[in-house]
Image (cartoon, grey):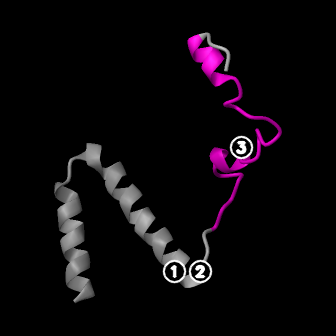
Amino acid sequence: MAKKIKQRLHTTIEEIPESKLGEILDFMEFLLEKERYKKKGKLDLEPGKDPILEFIGGVSHGSLARDIDSELYGEKA
């Protein structure tokens, strides 16, 4: 059964426009990562590979929303 599905996948991928191949690859990699998570019970978070993870805690020393109303609307709270 798995062999037939892999053959169908290969045939279908050959018909997909090149502009959609990246989207298909992203989805397949997402499914693989999801399976890895299930097996390990955790995500592999690597700050060196993800700039958002590197930024976590970057503004923990202050409040980004402090005085936002006066900045946006010119009003004092």
Look at mark 2 in the image and give the residue it sits on: 41
| Foreground residue among 22 and 33 | 33
Seen in the picture, residue 63 relative to 31 is either above or below; the reply is above
Q: Is residue 36 left or right of residue 75?
A: left
What is the quadrant of the N terminus in the image? bottom left
Disc nearer the start of the sequence (3/2): 2
Q: Position of residue 67 (x, y in %)?
A: 69, 23
Q: At 36% across and 50% down in the image, what residue appears?
A: 22
Q: Position of residue 4 (x, y in %)?
A: 19, 83
Q: Residue at x 53, y 76 (%)?
A: 36
The residue nearer to you, when weighing 37 against 15, is: 37
Residue 46 position, x and y percent, is 68, 59
Can you identify the residue that label 3 sits on? Answer: 55
Mark 1 neighbour density, 10 Å: few (under 14) some (14–19) many (20 or more): few
Distance of label 3 from label 2 (alpha carbons)? 24 Å
Using the rendered view, name the quadrant where residue 37 is placed. bottom right
In this view, the residue farthest toward the right is 61
Residue contact at pointers 1 and 2, CB within 8 angstroms? yes
Query: Which element carries disc 2, helix, strand or loop?
Result: loop
What amino acid is labelled 2 in the image? Gly
Q: Position of residue 33 (x, y in %)?
A: 50, 69
Q: On the image, numbered disc 1 is attached to which residue?
A: 38
Q: Local crowd at mark 3 within 10 Å, few (<14), some, or many (≥20)?
A: few
2 sits to left or right of 22 = left
Read off the magenta span.
44-73
Amino acid type at circle 1 is Lys
